[in-house]
Amino acid sequence: MTLDTYILSHIEPEPDYLYRLWRATNIYMLHGRMASGHLQGRLLKMLVQMIRPKRILEVGTFSGYSAICLAEGLEEGGKVYTFEINDEQEDFTRPWIEGSPVADKIEFIIGDAIKEAPRLGLEFDMAFIDGDKRTYVETYEMVLSILKPGGFILADNTLWDGHVTDPAYDRDHQTQGIRRFNDHIAQDQRVEQVILPLRDGLTLIRKK
């Protein structure tokens, strides 16, 4: 038994709906591994239960897996506003979100979150950044501007398969974006942060 298998057998089981979504994501979508999956999904739900936000902003919906996990942890009246810039994914993702047990807690929006999220006129308690790695710094600055003091940002893929420390990827634009983001956060006195070596790296950031 691998360590990953051991971990998954000793945490909250993956709900059947999410398992079916994960399977469909990997069958029908390119880069299916981008979906959060069982371990990260259960962590997202628990972090929401711990932080108890009323409004969550997600940048990068992909197949909707993480949005559903975030919504699972919300208390009554809570809402996830999730943005996906790639309109070609809507035909796959929207039915899965709208058919989920937490559909009433998710607002799925096609558009560029950097431009469109501030136009909602809302303040958020929590955010999950999982969009274009090349614009992580710009996304972060937008999110921080509409996040309440004491609010939390979760940034995904911040170790980027270890590429952040591999000189072979110095010219890769996605890797450059992640490195730029990590350096930016490390020097940002407005926040506290910790990187978890979970899956592909997950950075937890608290706005002071």
Image (spheres, rainbow, N blue to C red):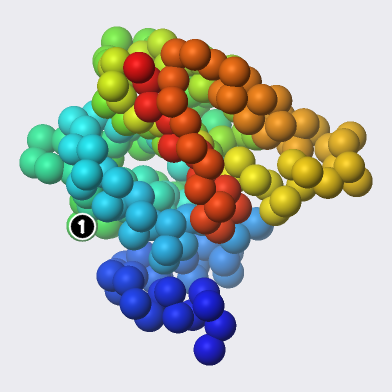
Q: Residue at x 37, y 20 (%)?
A: 207
Query: Which image quarter holds the C terminus?
Result: top left
Q: Position of residue 82 (x, y in %)?
A: 38, 35
Q: Answer left or right for 20 relative to 142.
A: left
* Residue drawn at (48%, 37%) of the image: 194
| Count of marks, rendered view | 1
Q: Is residue 137 visible?
A: no
Residue in view at x 40 percent, y 50 percent: 66
**Disc 1 target residue:** 101
Q: Secondary structure at mark 1?
A: loop
Q: Position of residue 145 (x, y in %)?
A: 41, 11
Residue shown at 28% from the left, 70% from the top: 12
Q: Nearer the viewer, residue 165 or 177?
A: 165
Neighbor class of circle 1 (other Cα within 10 Å; few <14, some 14-19, many 20+) is few
Any part of residue 121 in sight: yes
Q: Farthest residue toward the bottom?
A: 1
Name the amino acid, label 1. Answer: Pro
Q: Quick check: 21 left or right of 130?
A: left
Quadrant of res 57 = top left
In the image shown, does 8 or 17 lie closer to the viewer? 8
Q: Position of residue 173 (x, y in %)?
A: 80, 33
Residue 112, percent from left and from top? 52, 23
Toward the left, the furthest residue is: 76
Please say if 105 is above or below 143. below
- Given residues 194 and 78, the one toward you in this image is 194
